[in-house]
């Protein structure tokens, strides 16, 4: 089962049809669009600012996005492969 963890008062938000590998992780201010796929050991960690991912994007094995600064978040477009 994937790890979906709150950080402070923020919980990840998942769109319809999101698929997460059993050992993938979502932490904090993460917002996934419809049909996003996270592969094994992929991590989206938004414990500083937000991470917004557009629909149909894919994070392959061990892909990581980590926003630790409170100044600027990350917006990842639609149908992006990382």
Image (tube, helix red, strand yellow):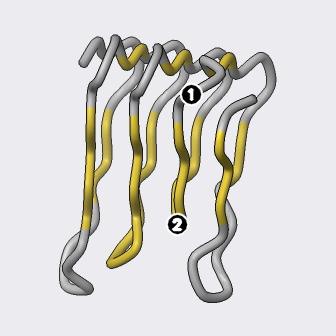
Which corner quadrant of the image does residue 49 belong to? bottom left
Q: Position of residue 65 (x, y in %)?
A: 27, 45
Taking the image as shown, residue 34 lies to the left or right of residue 81, namely right
Taking the image as shown, residue 15 lies to the left or right of residue 35, namely right
Q: Position of residue 29 (x, y in %)?
A: 52, 66
Taking the image as shown, residue 15 lies to the left or right of residue 3, namely right
Which of 71/2 is in front?
Answer: 2
**Which of label 1 and label 2 is nearer to you?**
1
Q: Are marks 1 and 2 in contact (CB under 8 Å)?
A: no
Which label belongs to residue 47? none
Crowding near the residue tagged with mark 2, few <14, some 14–19, many ≥20 C-alpha atoms within 10 Å = many
Q: Residue at x 45, y 37 (%)?
A: 53
The N terminus, quarter of image:
top right
Residue indicated by mark 2: 29
Q: Position of residue 30 (x, y in %)?
A: 52, 55
Above/below status of 52 relative to 54: below
Q: Residue at x 29, y 23 (%)?
A: 62
C-alpha distance separating marks 1 and 2: 19 Å
Q: Residue at x 46, y 16 (%)?
A: 40
Under tag 2, what secondary structure? strand
Residue indicated by mark 1: 23
Q: How many marks?
A: 2
Under tag 1, what secondary structure? loop
- Mark 2 or mark 1, which is nearer the start of the sequence? 1
Q: Position of residue 2 (x, y in %)?
A: 67, 33
Which corner quadrant of the image does residue 6 belong to? bottom right
């Amino acid at each position: 089962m994937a790890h979906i963890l709150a950080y402070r008062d923020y919980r990840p938000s998942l769109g319809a049809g999101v698929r997460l590998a059993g050992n993938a992780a979502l932490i904090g201010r993460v917002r996934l669009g419809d049909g996003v796929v996270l592969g094994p050991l992929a991590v989206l960690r938004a414990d500083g600012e937000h991470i917004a991912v557009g629909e149909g994007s894919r994070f392959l094995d061990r892909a990581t996005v980590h926003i630790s600064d409170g100044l600027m978040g990350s917006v990842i477009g639609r149908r992006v492969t990382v």
